[in-house]
Amino acid sequence: MIGGEFVINTLSLGSLYALLALGLVLVYGILKLINFAYGEYIMVAGYTMFLLGTYAGLPIWVNMVVAVLLAALTSYLTELVAFRPVRTHAFHAMLVTSFAVSVLLQNAALLFVSPRSRAVPLPAAFNESISLFGVVTPLRNVLTIVTTVVLLVALSLLMKYTVLGIAMRAAADKFTTTRLMGVPANLVISVAFIISGFLAGTVSLFWVGRSASVDPLIGFAPLLIAFIATVIGGMNSLVGAVAGGYVYGLLFNLLSVLLPASMINYRDAFMFAIVILFLLLKPEGLIRGSYTEERVG
Amino acid sequence: MSPLGKNRALAGLQDSPTIGFIALALVAGAVIVYVAGSSVLVDIYTYLCINVMFVLGLQIYMGHSGVLNFTFVGFVGIGAYASGILSTPPMVKAMGVPNMYQALVDVHMPVVPAILAGGVIAAILAAIVAWPLMRLSDAVGVITLFAGLIVIHVVLTQWDNVTNGPRTFFGIQSFTTLWVALGGAVLTLIFAYYFKESSLGLRLRASRDDRHAGRSIGVNFVAVRYYSFVISSFVAGLAGGLWAHYITSFSPKSFYVTEFFLLLTMLVIGGAGTISGAVTGTAIVSVMRELLRQLEGYLNNSGAISFEVYGLTEVTVAILLIIILIARPEGVIGVREVRLPFLSRKRRPIESAEDTSA
């Protein structure tokens, strides 16, 4: 029951969730904004692949690159148009704004494309299987793991060794002090949104790759996953987000294997009950980060 | 009740003329619609009254605490299902919900007690789960309440021995007429007003405005939030029951994120902190929504454009909400109740002193 296949599946699922959680936490860390529109960046990348793949006739890898870039651009534009003007308002205003942006983008897809799901052309490699350590697994899973490792390494280099990265980490720690040191707030926040959108776009390639279709509500499930993973890992730590993603992947696969068939439909309820328990018992997550008071009593 | 709360509560009823005016306006609107005799208008107005109940119920907790309460719409669903199951004749349930537990099929009571029971059941469930949730604040609090809504939704969708699962639950008696909905809206209005000005309401507002100052004068935020959350969920359950006996058939997807978004929009556009704001926002969004829906229908039927139009309403409402949040984050009405020049009482000095600081 728990063998090589389980390990590869869990690693690949966990990698996807780790990227998702990381994108959410990058913005949360600096702006303290839970971005409900995050799932919609995934949708944008999915629709880009659908539209280009169906109508443009470009090589498929070009579609994929454009899709990821457009997700990053959408993320940047939402920051510019919607989040920046409300940034100085109350916590609650920014949150409601992100919720509104999410509904807006979803319904724009409904309005301008279609409420029905659309088939997305994928590279042939996504459907091939390979044998690894005696386990036959879709090549997609291996690609997910490899992409994640590459991105995580690149991102940690960026965060550790560039001025921009150091400024971003500083901003996540003490935003006001960082600004006093002469770091432009708009730049740091914009870059956080762009990277966040870039990660969402990358996730989208693999997420859409599993079902080979895209619909206006496709962003909802990954958004929930990103929430759970960040809560488990810790809302204030990038490393925590990655750890949370892998733990969530493991939990999800374990529940899928262990829950009796009659209870499998309640899996989401179980996952969220676990989240609530986690928040109550360990609100700072697995990795504490610059945790500040989140409780009133 | 603390002495502080008592004094301010008495002084605080200064907005009674405004609330009375809103109640009268609601009644007058209903009479006009009734006299005009158009069944479409009566339907729209009935729905508006039910929405007033929803939004005021949401405001009781969310408006005064500043916590984005996603679970509200879940408790609306619990009230709707509970009252529907209690009031629907066993014959109809046996047909409509094939897997329902026999005990639930057999239970049957008149509509009014069923709706009240729906409210009580929602309140009891809220009372059971809410205490630990009230301790969390800010980001973590929001995610927890969001998770709470998803848990309620999954249970409503999957527990087909009770709710008929994701399929439609139908056969509920039609009970909520224009006048019933109006009565509900006016009663909720008065209740929400007294809640806002009560000691509990004041302390809840203190928890929103300044956590540390509030705590320094001995406000126990967890308790204050807890009671307010339960009261808000009670109103949610009642309003859900009235809604169920108006719409007569529904499925769990009526109590999820999309519907919550509409209620949230109504609350925030008008101004979450005030009764007049909540009612104004409800009116604005309801009218807009109805007009846009007509437009959508017209566009789809006329063949003027080659594709079906969906989601125009939500896109427009979302854009309006974003504009309001940018330009006037406290809502159209703002942080204080509307004062009607021809109705306002002469103010005593102590109140005007307070008003300058508001």
Image (tube, coloured by chain):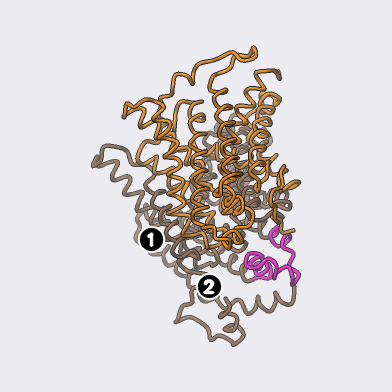
Chain colours: A orange, B brown
* Lower position in the chain sequence, tag 2 or tag 1: 1
Chain letter of disc 2 in the image:
B
Q: CA distance from mark 2 to mark 1?
A: 30 Å
Which residue in the protein does label 2 denote? B336
Give whichever of A116, B289 is nearer the camera: A116
Dot 1 crowding, Cα within 10 Å, few <14, some 14–19, many 20+: many
Above or below residue B281? Residue B252 is above
Label 2 SS: loop
Local SS, label 1: helix
Where does residue B323 sit, x and y in percent of width and height?
42, 59
The residue under label 1 is which amino acid type? Val
Question: What kind of residue is marked 2?
Answer: Arg
Count of picture labels:
2
- Side of A35 where A55 appears, left or right: left
Q: Nearer the viewer, mark 2 or mark 1?
A: 2
Which one is nearer the viewer's eye here, B45 or A212?
A: A212
Disc 1 is attached to a residue of which chain?
A: B
Residue sitting at x 54%, y 52%: B242
* Pointer 2 and pointer 1 on the same chain: yes
On screen, B197 above or below A206?
Answer: below
Residue B87 seen in this snapshot: no
Residue B89 in magenta stretch? no
**Mark number displayed over residue A122:** none
Magenta range is B198-227
Is A150 situated left or right of B39 in this image?
A: right
Above or below, comparing residue B264 to residue A141 in the picture:
below
Residue at 46% of width from left, 49% of height from top? A101
Give percent across and percent down for residue A271: 66, 36
Residue behind mark 1: B33
Q: Is residue B202 found inside the magenta-colored segment of the image? A: yes
Image quarter hosting the N terminus of chain A: top right
Q: Picture coordinates of residue B43 (x, y %)?
A: 41, 52
